Image (cartoon, rainbow, N blue to C red):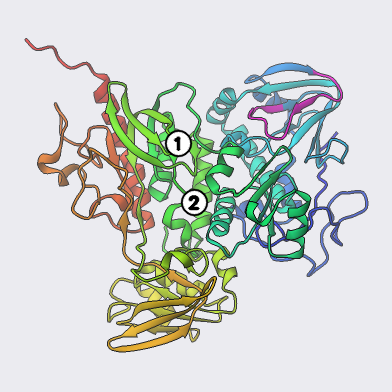
Amino acid sequence: MRYQLRYVRVEGNHTGSARADARPPHQSTDGLFRPSPAGSIGRVVMSPFPELGDQFEELAQAAFRTLDEAQFARAAAYGRPERVDEGRIVFDVGDDDADLLLVESGGIEVLQDDLDGEPILRAGPGQFVGELNLLTGQSRILRARVAAAGLVHRVPARQFRLLMAQDAELSDLLLRAFLARRRLLVQRAGRNLEIIADEATGVGMALRTFLIRQDLPHRWIEQNTAEGRVEAAAAGLTEADLPAAVMPQATLRQVEPRALSHRLGLTYRRTPDGVADLTIVGAGPAGLAAAVYGASEGLETVLLDAVATGGQAAASSRIENYLGFPFGLSGEQLAARAVVQALKFGAHLASPCAVVSMRTSDEGHVLTLVDGTEIVTRAVLIATGAAYRNLPLDRWSDFVGSGIYYAATDLEARAVAGLPVTVVGGANSAGQAAIYLAQQAGQVTLAVRGPDLAKDMSSYLVERIRADPRITVRTSTRVTALAGTHRLEEVTLTAGADDHPCGCFGLFCFIGAAPATGWLTGVALDDKGFVPTDGQLGDRWTGVGRGPLPFETSVPGVFAAGDVRWSSMKRVAAAVGEGASAVRSVHQALAFAAVPAPRPR
């Protein structure tokens, strides 16, 4: 028995709403996907993993692998055999178990939300059941039952992590299969997670950003459409309940990302040993690099982020000067690939998961989360980065997410398609945003406070901006006023004594850098809030018996890397290098702490 996928290609998951139960013209009557006629597929979101392909046949080749006898025997050695009877539910929607199931005989079928419905895939002898949630720890999003009695091998989470660490061939094979299956599930946009919300609001944009960065299969339904009203009524929801997340076993009213993450099992869970070796606060490029290197070198590694993985880098529409990517890639793609690497090596990721304080105790360093949970860890890496500043303008908070944005990705670009927008800032992030938005917005104005566009921006971006007729550059210019009803509609640009009101349905803000260190106590900061390290500390070092290691803060065992560090280079590649390098110092600090202090004579 081989895998079969009953596949429905829709436009409703990342790009708009659609009926998941509608049969597209390219689905055959036997329920199996068939190649679509030319021009019949809607807009496709580019995958962070182009090596897997984006056509069904390419994804299926990676997703529906059968292990040979030697591979199956090696994988089964990590699990325990289990006889299963026909009809048994081996896992259900919402279950927290993250076991890999290897089918030796018989068969297992996987369904979405209806035990009487048709399975979306079947696994027979030599095949396996599982997808990306085995790495992320996310609660099950599907259910599985035994189609034919037989023998399966259940590989529990801890043993599965050992398998991934010890067997390179199986690790690569399983990882490719999990990623391909997640792509197929995302495109299928099933009913196990439906979000009814308004993307044009701040909370709607926050939900959408969280879902996309976490690559969660979901169906998005705009609440102000006829479909949205029908679906809300069917779920017993009023307008006051929205936004809402509708799942088979629960409906979350007035939902926000943290509550949804908690329900899906993506918030922090204690490590198997209770105490982490390294906890990284901030999942931007520095934090992700540290997670990859820490986990791959055997450290029990936890990675936390208050919003979602990727940090500021995930807001970049295109990075062209990152080593090894001559054709460029988006920050979102870079972050997605790094997340998978970290998970592959056994790092534990949790977001949204804000840290509110840190203290040192006899057990080690203790991080307190916003919900009061405490994480005990032997070492800490601060990689919270720096956030773009707000402009001190009336009604600024009213328009955040409803016309004011701090990122220029596909999500924000859709919201302003064909409309005039303004980009504020004079560094690379602003330049990348202006170039990207010019492809979709009606007209782009780049407002630069200083007199020279080339002062803080890479020359390749300056040349492209000057050559693009869709971009108007205004130097020595400030945004001084905002106007609009429910969303931003107009800004005032001021140059000298001249005020110039202009239509603007998207204000993209890339100015300044305020370090995210408000939660830090007991760690020395400079006068702007950045974290000095090693040679920058002077007499602020509090350690005894040794000097500070590279990237170590004033508190022994606490390190900093990336944009949050004083005088760091604000570039993605530099942040990655700092995060990776800091792990070496973590090893040295842990080794020093493990050596007993010499007894006084």
Q: Amino acid at mark 1?
A: Asp
Residue beneath disc 1: 371
Q: Amino acid under label 2? A: Ala
- Mark 1 and mark 2 in contact? Answer it, CB < 8 Å: no
Q: Is residue 85 magenta?
A: yes
Q: CA distance from mark 1 to mark 2?
A: 26 Å
Question: Dot 1, how many residues are within 10 Å of its Cα: few (below 14), some (14-19), or many (20+)?
Answer: few
Kindly give the residue lying farthest to the top in the view shown: 601
* Viewer-proximal residue among 350 and 62: 350
| Residue shown at 39% from the left, 88% from the top | 500
Please report whichever mark, 1 or 2, sits nearer to the chain's N-terminal start.
Answer: 2
Quadrant location of the C terminus in the rendered image:
top left
Return the x and y of residue 285 as percentages of the image width and height.
41, 50
The circle on residue 393 is none
Q: Residue at x 52, y 44 (%)?
A: 258
Q: Secondary structure at mark 1?
A: loop
Q: Main secondary structure of the magenta part?
A: loop
| Magenta range | 84-101
Q: Position of residue 174 (x, y in %)?
A: 64, 36
Which is closer to the viewer, label 1 or label 2?
1
Residue neighbourhood size for the residue with mark 2, other residues' Cα within 10 Å, grouped as few (<14), some (14–19), many (≥20)? many
| Picture coordinates of residue 399, whole percent (x, y) | 48, 67
Q: Position of residue 471 (x, y in %)?
A: 46, 82
Locate residue 467: give its quadrant. Answer: bottom left
Instruction: Please determine whether, in this image, residue 70 is positioned above or below residue 492.
Output: above
Which residue, given by chain and number where applicable, does mark 2 sit on? 335
Horizontally, is 544 left or right of 83 in the view?
Answer: left
* Residue at the far right in the pictured view: 29
Whether residue 579 appears in this view of the structure is yes
Quadrant in the picture for the N terminus: top right
